[in-house]
Image: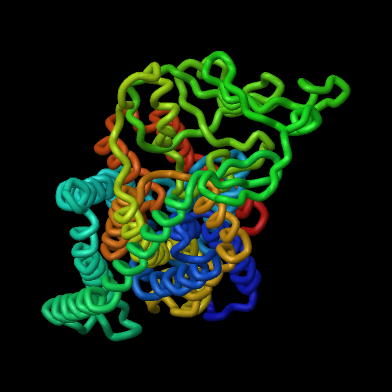
């Protein structure tokens, strides 16, 4: 043993706190932002409101359910008995774990790899332990359970999401008037989510709040009581408000459309039913010279002619947006990168993809979008191909008949589920705080307790203030960098329908919450990607999922454990060589 609060260990604690904050900051700048992206995009929440809610529920999750995951990482994964009287060495090992995880996060972000922070921490812990104690220093049963959960969790998350999607599809979307069952289902969704969250907090909860003394029947009674109360409040207050707001919005849209069709020429807008249109000037040759009018080129290309086509004296790049006509069997549901040619140089894909990939939406200016890696290691991974406009569907069908693919969901149902995504975003943020915050600061908690107790046994409880510190790091990353990710994901990107987004988010959050309660450090990214793939397959068959991108994500996941482990082993080797 060492003396508690030994002065010679203080520098390690200070460095550990700093590195853990950087790691939490990186997680907050990426994953947290994705929970509220769709709610911001549907205008249900502002960016500021989304950040405030994320801050509250990330910290709440880390404090109320995060302690179990941190206990697994700091006490159950390693055989601590092998570090008796070697507290300094274990402190260096935990610091190696934090350093390698933070460094790998930065490298992966630079290389646009969608990695998992959970994989990094577990791999780094294994790496330094192999250097210090070889294979004897690990508890292989715990490690096997963690690795197995990485394969089970995306499947479980996908199955939960598919179950919700099937219920919604059969009882709401297929109904003759889907808006009515959608409103009736709103209190049930709120009640279910509240019951699950309250039970996860109260049953065998944190000792700090004496929740561990509450029996099972008490936890069930509290969960169902609060859930039923919330359902009644939603039915009494929220459902009428939503009905009035959505129907009012639809009535206003119909009134706007009934006023006539507007045409724009130059700087003037005229209405076909306006008896006294404002003066409009004719398009002159000079207007044509300076304007960029779209024109359809051979091969189904929509081209924006550059100035140098009309006037050879100017030099401006030409932007061509290509809509390939291959792969006509693909269902029209989902997500895809854009394909743009700039001076005939392909940006969005290789030349070999021209005849097979549908590509939409990349700005010709070269502006970076999330699909191009703004949030590369986040859970908002573009796996589902984007739904094509009806005109392009008809072009692919040769201009005859109705295009294949599922019909769009009714507008009023989409608005209802867009509002419900506030619920799933809060649920996901709470679950993320309970799992990923603990992953980021698990080694830091171990360092602090060794410093506090003077023993590798770490008998003390996980301190509340360190969980709050991890939550602070994540929310700082959210407010400084994540705000842009929220806005870009929500406003610059159209991903999937509101009902699909709801089922994906609630399935992933449910799985992460369950794993956090058990104490298994799983990946939030894993769960969300699993839900995206499963829902994409069910709603639009395999052609609706970008399997090539999915393979790239799997590769990034597989690389993470050995990469983080190798970096951690390197740091530990250097520490042992120069500091021990």
Q: Position of residue 349 (x, y in %)?
A: 56, 25
Work out whether residue 509 or residue 153 is closer to the camera in this orientation and state it: 509
Outermost residue to the right: 313
Q: Nearer the viewer, residue 242 or 93?
A: 242
Q: Quadrant of the C terminus?
A: bottom right
User: Compared with residue 283, is residue 466 higher up or lower down, i.e. above or below?
Assistant: below
**Residue furthest out toward the left:** 217
- Can you see residue 290? yes
* Nearest to the observer: residue 559 or residue 375: 375
Residue at horizontal 27 percent and vertical 45 percent from the top: 158
Q: In the picture provided, is 25 more to the left or to the right than 170?
A: right
| Rendering colour mode | rainbow
| Residue pictured at 22% horizontal, 70% vertical | 191
Q: In the rendered view, would you say 114 is above or below 194?
A: above
Q: Residue furthest front?
A: 275
Please give the count of numbered marks on the rendered protein: 0
Image x and y of residue 267, in percent: 70, 45
Could you say which quadrant of the image residue 265 lies in?
Answer: top right
**Viewer-side residue, 374 vs 437:** 374
Instruction: Work out whether 491 lies above or below 476.
Output: above
Point 60% across, 28% down: residue: 340
Q: Position of residue 495 (x, y in %)?
A: 43, 44
The answer to whether 45 is drawn above or below residue 262 in the figure is: below
Q: Is residue 139 visible?
A: no
Q: Residue at x 67, y 54 (%)?
A: 578
576 left or right of 314?
Answer: left
Rendering quarter of residue 255: bottom left
Residue 500 percent coordinates (x, y): 31, 48
């Amino acid at each position: 043993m060492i003396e508690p609060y030994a002065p010679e260990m203080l520098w390690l604690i200070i460095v550990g706190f700093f590195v853990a904050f950087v790691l939490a900051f990186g997680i907050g700048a990426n994953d947290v932002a994705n929970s509220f992206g769709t709610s911001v995009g549907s205008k249900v929440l502002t960016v500021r409101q989304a950040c405030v809610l994320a801050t509250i529920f990330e910290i709440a999750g880390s404090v109320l359910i995060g302690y179990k995951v941190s206990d697994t990482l700091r006490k159950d994964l390693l055989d601590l008995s092998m570090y008796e009287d070697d507290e300094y060495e274990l402190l260096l090992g935990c610091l190696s774990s934090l350093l390698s995880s933070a460094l790998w996060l930065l490298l992966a972000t630079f290389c646009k790899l969608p990695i998992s922070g959970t994989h990094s921490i577990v791999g780094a812990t294994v790496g330094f332990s192999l250097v210090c104690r070889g294979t004897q220093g690990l508890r292989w049963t715990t490690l096997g359970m963690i690795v197995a959960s990485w394969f089970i969790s995306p499947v479980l998350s996908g199955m939960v999401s598919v179950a919700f999607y099937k219920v919604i599809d059969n009882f709401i979307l297929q109904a003759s008037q889907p808006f009515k069952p959608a409103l009736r289902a709103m209190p049930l969704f709120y009640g279910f989510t509240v019951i699950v969250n309250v039970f996860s907090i109260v049953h065998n909860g944190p000792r700090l709040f004496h929740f561990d003394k509450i029996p099972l029947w008490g936890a069930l009674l509290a969960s169902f009581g609060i859930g039923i109360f919330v359902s009644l409040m939603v039915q009494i207050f929220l459902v009428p408000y939503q009905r009035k707001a959505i129907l009012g919005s639809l009535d206003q849209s119909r009134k706007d459309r009934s006023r006539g069709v507007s045409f724009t020429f130059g700087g003037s807008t005229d209405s076909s039913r306006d008896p006294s249109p404002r003066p409009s000037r004719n398009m002159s040759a000079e207007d044509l010279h300076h304007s960029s009018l779209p024109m359809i080129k051979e091969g189904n290309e929509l081209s924006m002619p550059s100035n140098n086509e009309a006037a050879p004296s100017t030099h401006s790049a030409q932007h061509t947006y290509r809509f390939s006509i291959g792969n006509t069997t693909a269902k029209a549901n989902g997500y895809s990168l854009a394909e743009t040619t700039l001076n005939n140089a392909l940006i969005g894909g290789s030349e070999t993809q021209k005849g097979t990939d549908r590509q939409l939406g990349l700005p010709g200016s070269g502006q970076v979008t999330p699909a191009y890696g703004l949030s590369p290691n986040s859970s908002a991974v573009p796996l589902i191909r984007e739904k094509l406009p009806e005109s392009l569907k008809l072009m692919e069908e040769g201009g005859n008949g109705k295009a294949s693919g599922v019909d769009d969901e009714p507008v009023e149902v989409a608005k209802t589920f867009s509002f419900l995504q506030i619920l799933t975003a809060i649920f996901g943020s709470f679950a993320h705080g309970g799992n990923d915050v603990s992953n980021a600061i698990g080694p830091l908690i171990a360092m602090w307790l060794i410093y506090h107790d003077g023993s590798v046994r770490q008998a003390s409880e996980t301190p509340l203030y360190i969980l709050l510190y991890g939550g602070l790091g994540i929310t700082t990353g959210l407010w400084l960098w994540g705000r842009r990710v929220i806005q870009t994901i929500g406003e610059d990107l159209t991903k999937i329908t509101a009902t699909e987004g709801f089922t994906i988010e609630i399935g992933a959050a449910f799985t992460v919450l369950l794993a956090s309660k058990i104490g298994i450090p799983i990946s939030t990214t894993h769960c969300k990607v699993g839900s995206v793939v499963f829902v994409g397959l069910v709603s639009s068959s395999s052609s609706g999922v970008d399997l090539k991108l999915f393979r790239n994500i799997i590769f990034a996941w597989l690389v993470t454990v050995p990469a983080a482990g190798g970096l951690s082993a390197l740091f530990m080797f250097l520490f042992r060589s120069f500091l021990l």
